[in-house]
Image: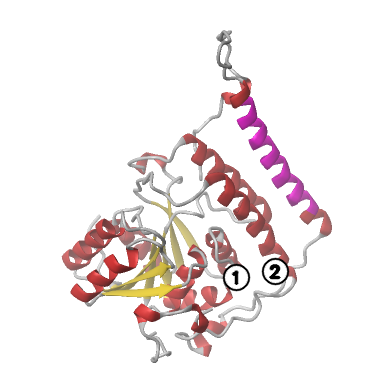
Amino acid sequence: MDEFHPMRHCSIIIPAYNESERISATLDKILFHVSKAQWSAEILVVDDGSQDQTAAIVKQYADDYPAVTLYRIPHRGKGYAVAYGMMRARYSHLLLSDADLPAPLSEANKLFACLQTGADIAIGSRWLDPRLQISRQPTFRRFLGRVFNLVVRAVLALTFVDTQCGFKLFTRSAAGQVFPRQQIDGWAFDAEVLFIAKRLGLATVEVPIETYHDGRSKVRPLQDGFHMLLETLAIRWRVAQGQYTTPRMIPGWSQTEASGRAAFSPLRIRPAFFAMSAAVILSLVIGLFATVGQVNNSRPHEGSRSLGKSSPGALVSSANFPDANDDDDDLSPDDATDGDSL
């Protein structure tokens, strides 16, 4: 695809937690593309309380490249780090990228094209066209991702095939309406952001992009997956309580930007719907652990003979798997804390 010209003013937000092994390669690729494509861009890396050398590495890049800015905050989760960066972005278009750069930056042209035709948000998708995947996640990760996607569809009534891909583009107006309302600090923030956008009447387009999987992911499939299920259910509860109705006042955004162009009306939860959703999730979790248990029990014990029969629970299909300038001028990016943010 030819380079996209009209929208090259872009803030690139990268949340990072213990990414010393990957962040240098990511910044090198981004800086190379920004220079080659002649973007007017800023690169905001939000260090989410890393315990390794992530902050030191990014600090060196910030010293060498004016486009790179480091923000250091106490560890609260990826969702919080993303919102923190979004609140401090200066340009008209805000691109979210995971620290492993899950897609070549040239794929952002597809997202820019959607915004040019009227979309407010464009999200990259690994599963609209799986043939574009250069490398895939392990089968177990894909299975858990499919489960989570089904839960998102059932509970939040979202129709996206892939809500979790770490490659999303927002107009400044859309970001100003969505992120001040964000409540989730953890991994499920993607689904929450897209749900808020839908309730605000923002146009979101899912775009198939070329992606690759880095096996050094920080996601713990079972533990983090369970928390994501709970966080997804909590979104419905927050809507019923009206917690998304009024934006939080966060430094970096004006009252107009955060007000929202459409009324965000609280949605009443029917008890039967909530109970059904909880039952579906519980059944999925029980089925998952039962499947894992059958796989383990089917393995021959030490000193016993294998009968050569496969365990029915060991067969799992992996096909079609979806898985501003900052107004707080007294804040130094390197010394940023959570007290002046969300």
Let me know if residue 286 is in the magenta part.
yes
Q: Residues within 10 Å of mark 1 (few under 14, many from 20)?
A: many
Q: Mark 1 or mark 2, which is nearer the start of the sequence?
A: 1
| Mark 2, secondary structure of its residue | helix
Query: Residue at point 22% right, 75% down?
Result: 63
Let me know if residue 59 is in the magenta part.
no
Q: Name the residue under label 1.
A: 183
Q: Residue 39: x, y in percent?
A: 23, 71
Q: Mark 2 points at which residue?
A: 238
Q: Are marks 2 and 1 in contact (CB under 8 Å)?
A: yes
Q: In this view, does 274 lie to the left or right of 102?
A: right
Q: Residues within 10 Å of mark 2 (few under 14, many from 20)?
A: some
Range of residues picked out in magenta: 275-294
Query: Residue at point 38% right, 78% down?
Result: 89
Query: Residue at point 71% right, 75% down?
Result: 242
Looking at the rendered structure, the kind of residue marked 1 is Gln
3D distance between C-alphas at marks 2 and 1: 9 Å
| Mark 1, secondary structure of its residue | loop
- Could you tell me if residue 207 is visible in this image? yes
